Image (cartoon, rainbow, N blue to C red):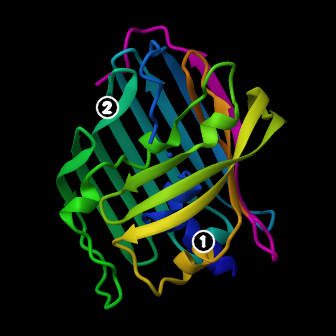
Amino acid sequence: MARLFARSLTSPTWSLSVISATVATVAALTHDRAFAQGRLEASYSISAARITIGNASVSAEIGETDYTASMSARGSGVMRILSSGDGNLKIQGHILDGVPVPDRYVSSTTADDDTLDVKMSFENGVATALEASPPPQSDDRVALTEQHRVGVTDPLTALFVPAGDGGPKETACARVLPIFDGRRRYDLKLAFKRIDQVKVGQGYEGPVVVCSMALLPIAGHRKSSPMLKFLTEGREMEIAFAPVAGTTLLAPLRVTVFYMLGNLVMQATRFATSPATTGAAPR
């Protein structure tokens, strides 16, 4: 099971998208509000059954007209013995009527003997130009069609959700995130669970909204994938969102996959946000 934990973290798609990425987060803002400016610098510890097996970091700058974000994840300690895994993701986008819209997405992820390199452009929510490493041959892989690239967002833009008035609240969880990472199309379905009070070692202290999270595979995946079965067969998962200062957005502070032999957790050890001092995020 420890090996399955490691694979779930380092898989080229489910790990960085679900756990970050974990989880992994369509960032639709309210259309009638001005889009504020802010920065996020976050570091995460990833553990299985309280044993540290990896780390991740997220950096984002959000301006009035543009935004950029990057994420990296790396295995360490036990994970390096059980399963190799590294990942880097970057996104550039623009703000349209207060809504973050992805323009260019680049990622490179490796797990075991599977490497996925993706370069992807978006136009009005449609993944247009796409370069992606071909998946390993499999007889049970669900075929992707052109339609699966319509009405989608990338895994990084999907990390940010609207806070609503007055900070984290129930409405932040009322959404389904339609994600396409260049190889697989899937939804992350969120629903409200509770409001918690947290204190991060470095950075944020205050309320977070905790959402239940369900992974709904649509296309591009293998039906027989053990890791996919682990994440979808009634598995309880939740994600906690904290506010990004200077913006109306929330970003993940904690992701938990519950399991009787020990939970899989990505927890922020640093969650530093501040209003941006420049006009717009760099392009």
From the viewer's perspective, is residue 14 above or below residue 153? below
Res. 182 image quadrant: bottom left
Residue most extreme to the left: 129
Residue topped by disc 1: 231
Classify residue 30 as left or right of residue 266. Answer: left
For the residue pair 40 and 210, the one nearer the viewer reads as: 210
From the viewer's perspective, is residue 283 above or below residue 154? above
Q: Amino acid at mark 2?
A: Gly
Q: Quadrant of the N terminus?
A: bottom right
Residue most extreme to the bottom: 139
Q: Amino acid at mark 1?
A: Leu
Q: Residue at x 60, y 32 (%)?
A: 250
User: Residue 110, percent across and down?
Assistant: 41, 66
From the viewer's perspective, is residue 224 above or below residue 32? below
Tally of numbered discs: 2
Classify residue 40 as left or right of residue 44. Answer: left
Instruction: Look at the image and give the residue range highlighted in magenta.
Output: 258-283
Q: Quadrant of the C terminus?
A: top left
Q: Residue at x 53, y 39 (%)?
A: 58
- Magenta run includes residue 274: yes
Numbered circle sitting on residue 93: 2
Q: Residue at x 64, y 72 (%)?
A: 5
Numbered circle sitting on residue 169: none
